[in-house]
Image (tube, rainbow, N blue to C red):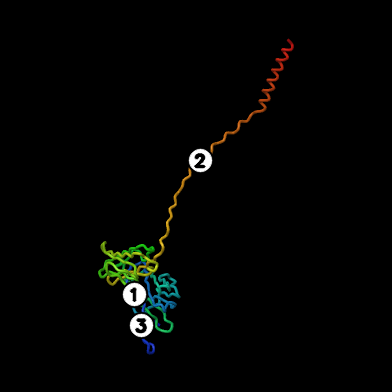
Amino acid sequence: MRYLLNTVWRVGNERYIHSITTVSKVSVEAGKSISIPCLYESQYKNHVKYLCEGYYWTYCRYAVKTNKPDPSGKYLISDDKKQNIFTVTINKLTVKNTYYWCAVEIDNGPDHGQYFQLSVISGTPSLYVDHQRITGYIEESITIRCHHSNSGEMKWCRLGRNCVTGSSGSTDGTTVTAHMRDPNVFTVTMSGLRTKDSGWYWCAKGDIQIPVYLTVTEKPITTTTTAVTYSEVRPKKKRSPKVTNHSSIKQFESKNFQETYRSSESTLEV
């Protein structure tokens, strides 16, 4: 059974408040895709999560569930139980893809859901980043450029944690600096990255947000390979050994002997 998030409800004499955290409004371009993170409380780690489509919680319809994929591929869902975040991805966006709820299924009670809105437009979104998923390296810095055309306060926040609203601050001990040197670009730099900085963040301008997933990892080691060229040295051709014609030698020796013999005979006759 579905139940609106952050509303107080009663079972017997006990009073409960439940919460899921996500963005509230995202501007996206028609035909593109968007991923939305939904942070839930740790006690719901093994519960079924789902995306519900519709303006009213009571009448929204299931779009995709962690135990029931969408066969059309329009909606995708994954659950990171280490960070207590499930992520929904909506592909091939149209202007009809507007109202949604991140939701957790409760076995013996009302489901919990948090509403978010997509503003799907045919042109450039009011707020967007170059890449929704980025990679940084341990002990190095990474810069995120948040392009915007709307007005309002600028923020850089980690999902479920604190926000940096000025020109400098920190999120979970990681230094953050922000500036607007280029027109309509809000630039955020995170320095001294650590593995634990991996996770979902969002850039905000006014009432619009755009989620960004940061992965922090070891920097790959690059090796330089030197190409060695060997010139081909061809061995000199060996001359064939001179072949002596023994038959010719024998003929020469025989002829020479005969001439000597005749000369001897002539001498004896005289």
Residue 91, above or below 14: above
Residue type (three-letter) at the residue carrying disc 1? Phe
Name the residue that disc number 2 marks. Answer: 233
Residue 168, above or below 10: above
Name the residue that disc number 1 marks. Answer: 116
Q: Nearer the viewer, residue 235 or 64?
A: 235
Q: Label 1, label 2: how many angstroms apart (C-alpha)?
A: 74 Å
Residue type (three-letter) at the residue carrying disc 3? Ile
Residue type (three-letter) at the residue carrying disc 2? Val
Q: Position of residue 154 (x, y in %)?
A: 27, 69
Using the rendered view, name the quadrant where residue 195 is placed. bottom left
Q: Which structural element holds mark 3?
A: loop
Tell me which residue sits at (68%, 25%) in the image: 250
- Number of on-image labels: 3
Is any part of residue 169 visible from this angle?
yes
Name the residue that disc number 3 marks. Answer: 17
Q: Nearer the viewer, residue 196 or 207?
A: 196
